[in-house]
Every structure is written in structure tokens, then in C-alpha cells.
Image (cartoon, rainbow, N blue to C red):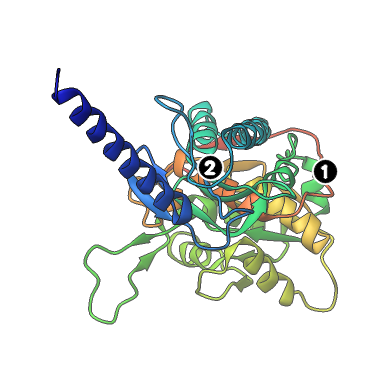
Amino acid sequence: MDVTKPLLVGRCRLLLQGLDDRLGEGAAGVAISRRDNQAVPLDGRAGAGGTKLLLQPRAGLGRFVRANTATSCDSQREERRSTMQLDKLAESASMHYTNREFPPAAVLHLEKVIRDESVVRPDPGGDVLEQVGKRKLRQPVKIANAIGNFPPNAQPVRSLEGLREAEAIFAFSFGYRVKSRPAPGQEVRLPGLNNRALAVISAQLKSILGVPLFAQFEISDALDDYTDVVADFSSPAEDLGTTGVIKSFVSRVEGKSVGKVVVVAHQHHLARCALVLLNDFNIESVPAVETYCGYDPREAQPRVVSPEEYIVHDFVVMALHRAWDRLPTQVVVGRAIAAPVPGS
């Protein structure tokens, strides 16, 4: 009689019992990530059953890693549903940012991040998006609602007639630089190449149109340093975001409301400026005939160092906005530049 056989069977039973105990602990309070083998505590705000889906790369065992008490069939259904919703969101965002003239490589990068690096919380009323890549959403948003926030034809186009009808120029900055060797007590922030290029465009427009120029403070500083034109109004020297900057501009319009403005902004920021102006402030806009599409290698603001970084940032901001009710439409003219005007 082989006395080792019952010993081996008993040992296997003990191992299986220990594995069941460990799985039971995971189901109670953590989700396990296969990518880094780390336990992710559930925060109590998760959906029914305290479940959270962690989206992982498609390679290997799958994109979703779960630890909950739901059945295998329930898990598979939730995974399929979330996969389909994220695919729709990625497709919607792809059309939106292609129309906004982002480089194809940046659009593909965004699609991959949405599909493979998002955190989704199941909810009876619709799965909720909590994080995209490294960026957590300021507040979770239902994926079904986010899909409607990326209209395919959002990019405003240039119109010479629109320029003639404009009552003011609104200039929005794009990042900044910092001094490498600032003196004690000296301002460390510099406008940088991006805002220098936008300042030159703003100065040319003001000289041609003769309307008031409202500039975000980094562009206002660049106007002072590199042109002979001075902004009629500069936003406060603080990070306000696009909506906050528009509020500061509108608050300084004296005697009447503004119906149409020329927008000076980076090519990849332009559409969001136009959408916020139209939907939140009822102000129509037309882009400058010449726009800027370059990126500064010495940029201090991480989100604007490259198209790949900026597109994910812009996506997170757009996902939180309600669906856009109105879209800008005009006739196409003009061109985009990738560097400051030579000699400026």
C-alpha cells in the first residue's frame, strides 16, 4: 500500500482550503490588479456589491480584474457591457479629436488609454467612469452621458466675414515656462514659446481690427515683452481654467454684452474655447485666420508638453461637461503655424 497517496491528497485539500480563504478575503474588500499584482482597496463608494472594474491591457488574461461576490456569469455580462460602452466612447472621442485636427498618433493614444487604462464602477443606472489613464475625473460621470459630450463636428472654422463682425478679441494662453535661474523674489513664470506665438497673432489682429483685446495674463506678458501692442484687459495672474478666464473677460465688458469675438488659442484648445463661449456664455466666436499648433519642449505644464498628453487632459475635461447644445459653424479659410512668426 502506498502511504504517500493519502498524505498528498490531504495536503492538496489544505492548499485548496487556504486558497478559498484568500479569495474570500479578496472578495470582501479588494480588487486585484493582474498588471502589477497589487491589491486595490474598495472605497465603499462602489456600486452594488462593493464592486469596481479595473481596466487592464487586452493582452494576457483580460482587461477587467474583479474581486466581488457576484457570479461568474454576472461578471462576464458586466465586463461585456462596460467593454461595449468604452468602445463607443473611444469611437466618439476619436471622431471628435480627428475633426479638431489632433495628430493621428495622439488620437490613437487616446483610444488606447480609454479602452485599456480606465477605471469603471458598475452602477445599476449605467457604468460610471472614474479615471482615465493617470487622470482621475473631478467627479465620476456615466459613460453613456460622456459619449454625448464629444460631438463629431466641434472644430470651429475660419471666416473672414466673422472677423469683420467681431466686437472683441479673446486670447487664451497655452502653458508657460519657468526661469532656470530666477533671482531671489523674482517672478519665476515666463510666457514661453506657445504664448509668444499667440501674442504675435493677437497683436496683428488688434492692429487690423481695432477692437478691444482681452488676454490671459501669460499672453499679456508676452505682448509687453515682444510686441508694441498692449492688452486692453488682462486676466488675473492665476490659473483659472478656460471657463474662469472667460468669466474674467466678460466681467470687464463695459456697458453692453458681447455677441461675437475672435478667439486666439492653440489649435488644439480652440474648439473647447468656442464650445464653452457658445453654450455657457451665449457668445459666438470665430477663430483667427492664422492659428498656432506647435508644442514647446521646455513647457513647464505637464499636460501641454505634447499632443498625446494634452488630448487625454482635454478628454477628461470634456467628459465632465454636459452635452453641447450648439456647435459653431463657419466657412473655412486660413492656415495653422507651428512656430512663432519669424523675426518677432
Q: Provide the secondary structure element on which disc 1 rests.
A: helix
3D distance between C-alphas at marks 2 and 1: 31 Å
Q: Provide the secondary structure element on which disc 2 rests.
A: helix
Percent position of residue 237, x then y:
50, 74
Amino acid type, label 2: Ile
Name the residue: 66% across, 34% down.
81
Decide which of 273, 222 is in the foreground and name it. Answer: 273
Identify the residue under disc 2. 311
Name the residue: 44% across, 59% down.
226
The number of numbered discs placed on residues in the rendered structure image is 2
Decide which of 2, 159 is in the foreground and name it. Answer: 2
Amino acid type, label 1: Glu
The image quadrant of residue 249 is: bottom right
Percent position of residue 68, x then y:
52, 47
Percent position of residue 149, x then y:
72, 46
Q: In this view, does 49 lie above or below 155?
A: below
The quadrant in which the N terminus is found is: top left
Other residues around mark 1 within 10 Å, as few (<14) / some (14–19) / many (≥20): few
The residue most toward the front is 1
Name the residue: 75% across, 35% down.
153
Identify the residue under disc 1. 161
Tell me whether the residue at label 2 lies in contact with that at label 1, contact meaning CB atoms closer than 8 angstroms. Answer: no
Disc on the earlier residue, 2 or 1: 1
In this orientation, does residue 76 appear? yes
Other residues around mark 2 within 10 Å, as few (<14) / some (14–19) / many (≥20): many
Name the residue: 63% across, 47% down.
122
Decide which of 87, 313 is in the foreground and name it. Answer: 87
Q: Say left or right for 341 vs 248.
A: left
Mark in the foreground, 2 or 1: 2
Decide which of 296, 65 is in the foreground and name it. Answer: 65
